[in-house]
Image (cartoon, rainbow, N blue to C red):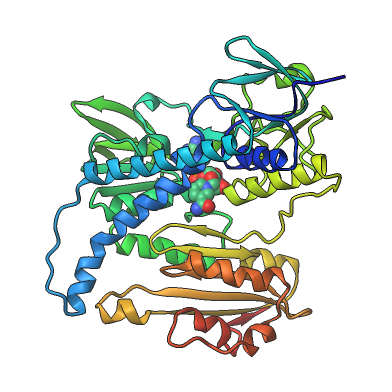
Amino acid sequence: MSFDYDLFVIGGGSGGVRAARVAAQGGAKVALAEEDRYGGTCVIRGCVPKKLMVFASEYSGMVEDAQSYGWDIQPGAFDWDKFKSKMHAELDRLEGVYRNILGNNGVETFDQRAMLADAHTVELADGTKKTAKHILIATGGRPSLPDMPGIELAITSNEMFHLEKLPESILIIGGGYIACEFAGIMNGMCVQTTQYYRGAQILRGFDDEARGLVSEEMCQRGVDLHLGTNILEMRKEGDKIWVKATNGDEKLFDQVMFATGRAPNSDGLGLEALGIELGRKGEIVVDQYSQTAVPSVYAIGDVTDRANLTPVAIREGMAFVETVFKGNPTSPDHELIPTAIFTQPEMGTIGLSEEDAREQEPIEVYATSFKPMQQSFAGRSERVLMKLIVSQATRKVLGCHIVAPGAGEMIQLAGIAVKMGATKEDFDRTVAVHPTMSEELVTMKTPTRTG
Ligand code: NDP
């Protein structure tokens, strides 16, 4: 049977574009459909603009620090419009890069929604049908909001990049990556920032000591964080939003942002009719090669809800191409993924938290928390954390957790050692780079705790 394409990719985000490009480079005839902008969540409404906003927000504290270092400069106002238009120009540029990558590699693109008509047929929104030997679903995810009175007044991270003006006050709901990152951004942009998190401590699932420090420092820097608190209802009051919280508080905010998790984009793709299994959250169920229950259909990235991170989606896409087009069955490696949370201060982490490691086996914990030189000289009381979790039996470093400016950059490198199976003694054999914060990772001699 002959098909129009060897591969039809639905979704032009990080994972889909990478798979399409690599398959096309290998000689496959490839098409890709994207209903929105190319680049997906990461480039258009996620990692990239978020990080630009983190950078923008961090300058607010830098003027004071510079003064402490002898600079005669005065703080000025932050011009949101100027920053926003520059940020969007950069996103336009990046979208162009993504389109060019596809075009230059001979991938045919369709700027419209697509769904599956059968195991080898994709139907585009205009009714056109295209056949393909393999179909790859890489449609990502979207913010999910709880049902509650007044929810239509809320915004999500999607809208944060398009605010007409910076609010004077904002309430952020949630305690995950997105809520905590935006709390830092808004606070840094001098917006009065309140955060409600329903649980006992933000960033559930990460190392307790690390998230405790992030939480403490966020509060120090001015985020009005309420733990064990959730929102009950909202209503419009003049040009503000009135909010009632579970702790009895009733307050007015200019904006209310929900960061209460993300849902896989698996609706309306014709999946159930084809017999493709969906999980409880709507995620596409795949095997270790990203193959669905229908052998010609594969899925990668956030729509499969494995590890919802851009570099993971890219690797899943590469493994798919390796498996299907290069005759080399490869499953993406989801073990020991380093990750950073761009809170202020940043957190970088890989491997097991102290709590999870202790459940697994006897461990030694090496941790140090201190005031780093640069900030302490500037008169700030901020602390950083460097922490290693070590297996007593194998001496391997099971987890590394860093809370510090630049922790994302640090964990990328420490991650290589941990992924290689480095022992505590391997860390110790490495000469310290002095004076740095991360040198503590190779100079901690005595366990802080064992057990
Ligand atoms: P998360 O799933 O990480 O966090 C959702 C938060 O919302 C949790 O604190 C959760 O509380 C809370 N929540 C869920 N439902 C409700 C509700 N009904 N009422 C109140 N609170 C609720 O989702 P995010 O949206 O923050 O991020 C999604 C994913 O995106 C992340 O898991 C990550 O994979 C990825 N991401 C990665 C980034 C990075 O690498 N730096 C940055 C941003 C996103 P509870 O803990 O009690 O369940």
> Which image quadrant for residue 19?
top right
Location of the C terminus (image quadrant): bottom right
Quarter of the view holding residue 280: top right
Q: Looking at the image, which residue is at 25% across and 39% down?
A: 251
> Where residue 274 appears, x then y in whole percent?
78, 19
Horizontal side of residue 418 vs 407, given as left or right: right
Percent x, y for residue 159? 37, 34
Q: Image height check: is 359 above or below 296?
A: below
Residue shown at the point (19%, 77%) measured from the top left: 68
- Rendered location of residue 237, percent (x, y): 22, 27
Total count of labels:
0
Asked whether residue 274 is in view, the answer is yes
Q: Nearer the viewer, residue 133 or 58?
A: 133
Residue 298 percent across, percent down from the top left: 75, 33
Q: Quadrant of residue 188?
A: bottom left
58 lies above or below 108? below
Q: Nearer the viewer, residue 172 or 155?
A: 155
> Is residue 182 toward the left or the right of residue 23 in the image?
left
Please identify the quadrant where the N terminus is shown: top right
Which residue appears at 17% of the width and 74% of the height?
A: 67
Q: Nearer the viewer, residue 260 or 75?
A: 75
Q: Is residue 230 in sight in this rendering? A: no
**Is residue 84 shown above or below 135?**
below
Query: From this viewpoint, which residue is outermost toward the top?
Result: 127
154 vs 317, left or right, is left
